[in-house]
Structures are given as structure tokens and as C-alpha cells.
Image (cartoon, helix red, strand yellow):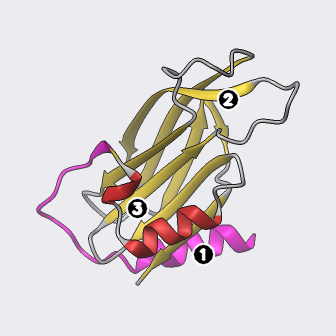
Amino acid sequence: MNKILLILIGFLLLTGCNTNSQLSYKEVSKKSLNKDIQSFFQGVKEENGVHLYFDNQNTAIFVYLNGSNVVQGEEAIYFTGFDVERVNETLNIFYNSDKTSDYSNSSLEHELFYKVNLDKDYEEVKLFNDGNETHFGTISGNN
């Protein structure tokens, strides 16, 4: 098994039983995150992609969608949608993205943070971009 998958399974096993919550998510500001989560996301800020942080103390995961790093002459990535779905023992995370050469459009979201409140333990977490399965850039968390 690859190392990231083993880390992911380990974090999922540590989440414990949580029978009173519902699967839900909300967009959050970077300022609202605790210092450990902010520190992790700051450490991956230079890497475009989707980064995942397991907050096992609060039975939640944080998702960082990062398209803020633009190489001059290339199109900028921005995000247009986010959702989560439970399918048996799998948590599916969906996001939509697009590209633009209009770097000055301040209404486009190049960096987003989401808190996903978990309703149960999951054996697997899958990521989908525009309906196609993809992978996380970085995975971390706490106990």
C-alpha cells in the first residue's frame, strides 16, 4: 500500500465513534482555523491542489482547495463548487474547478477552506474533480 493511503487509514481509525452528528460541510475562513491547522495549510500554500487535514479531536476534516500559485503565461485555476457524499463506508469529496487567463478578476475563488463535520468513521475518502477521481496533494492531522 502506498504511504499516503496507510496514513489516511490510520487517521480514520483514530476518529472513534460519533453517533450524534450529521455529515455536513461549510466554507470557513483561514482566520477561523486553529493554529495547528493554519500551520499545516501554510506549509502547503506553495503547492496547488487539494490538501486534507484530519481533526480527530473534533471529528472533522478540513479541506484546502489551493489554486493560488500561478505561473506567468499559464492559466489560473479557480474553484466553482464543493460537496460531500457518503456511499456506504466511503466519504466522497467533490469539487469543481476551471481555468482563466484573467488574473485580475477578484470574484474568482483561487483558495478555499472547508470544514467537513463527520457523521461516522469512514474506511476510505475519495476525491473527485469535475466528476473524475483524483488524489490529495497532502494529508495530515492530529490524534
x and y percentages locating residue 47 in the rendered image: 72, 53
Quadrant position of the C terminus in the picture: bottom left
Q: Which residues are magenta?
A: 1-27
Q: Please state which of the two labelled residues, at mark 3 or mark 1, is closer to the viewer.
A: 1
CA distance separating discs 3 and 2: 30 Å
Q: Amino acid at mark 3?
A: Tyr
Q: Classify mark 3: helix, strand or loop.
A: loop
CA distance separating discs 3 and 1: 13 Å
Q: Amino acid at mark 1?
A: Ile
Q: Please state which of the two labelled residues, at mark 3 or mark 2, is closer to the viewer.
A: 2
Label 3 CA crowd tier, 10 Å (few <14, some 14–19, many 20+):
some
Q: Classify mark 2: helix, strand or loop.
A: strand
Q: Which residue is mark 2?
A: 77
Pick the front one: 30 or 81: 30
Q: Which residue is mark 1?
A: 7
Label 2 CA crowd tier, 10 Å (few <14, some 14–19, many 20+):
many
Q: Which mark is residue 122?
A: 3
Farthest front residue in view: 104
14 to 88, vertically: above or below: below
Q: Classify mark 1: helix, strand or loop.
A: helix
Q: Is residue 1 visible?
A: no
Q: Earlier in the sequence, mark 1 or mark 2?
A: 1
Queried whether the magenta region covers residue 102, the answer comes back as no
12 to 20, vertically: above or below: below
Q: Amino acid at mark 2?
A: Ile
x and y percentages locating residue 87 in the rendered image: 40, 43
137 to 6, vertically: above or below: above
